[in-house]
Image (spheres, helix red, strand yellow):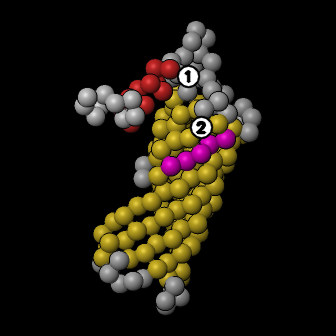
Amino acid sequence: MSSWVRLTSPIFVALACLFQSLPLHGESFKENFSAGIAYEGVLIHYGLNARWAAELRYLRDTSNSDSGKLLTELYSLRGYRYFQRSGRLRLYLGSELGLIQSWASNAGAQASGQALGAFAGSEYHLSQRVSLSFDMGPAIIAATEKTTHTRDAGLDFVVNSALSYYLF
């Protein structure tokens, strides 16, 4: 049997989750607890009530730099304030606080620091349990290089997207 048909294949699992979670009449959406994938990372989202939610997020990025391959990791906590739902769409505002670690392969350089951001975005429910979210906003990122103790900080504009599956 080919690998794409196996019950353990990621495509089969994703399709099973999507079809199992198609909305019933009246479109009652699950919004309490979800796990998801973001661009270059994963997340766990917990709805505190209809208006407020918290999220733990891990993101990992690799890029090329003058010092060789650069690996960056972000561990963050996000807070969400949701607004009134309009059909399948929910708008939100939020803030994020995170820890950043970075390594350059050729130079052996390491840096660590913090990130603080604010964002505005939307979440669109594709089905009762599956949603797609997109947000953007400014973030202040400050890091210190471990060998030279050089500190650098700057303001960046960050764009995030995620696909979430609400477990309940």
Which quarter of the rendering shows the N terminus? Answer: top left
Residue 50 in picture, x, y percent from top left? 72, 31
Q: Nearer the viewer, residue 128 or 81?
A: 128
- Name the residue located 53 percent from the left edge and 88 percent from the top edge: 149
Q: What residue sits 58% from the left and 9% below the top?
A: 25
Name the mark on residue 105.
none
Per the image, the residue denoted by label 1 is: 128
The prevailing secondary structure element of the residues shown in magenta is strand
Q: Which residue is mark 2?
A: 34
Helix, strand or loop at label 2? It is strand
Question: Which element type, helix, strand or loop, lies under badge 1?
Answer: loop
Foreground: 77 or 96? 77
Q: Quadrant of the C terminus?
A: top right
Mark 1 or mark 2: name the one nearer the start of the chain.
2
108 over 48 or under it: above or below: below
The residue lying furthest to the front in this view is: 1
Of all residues shown, which one is farthest toward the left? 2
Q: Which residues are magenta?
A: 42-46
The amino acid pointed to by label 2 is Ser
Q: Residues under labels 1 and 2: Cα distance?
A: 12 Å
Eyeballing the image, is 111 above or below 89? Answer: below
Q: Is residue 82 visible?
A: no
Residue type at numbered disc 1: Gln
Determine the residue positioned at 45% across, 60% down. 60
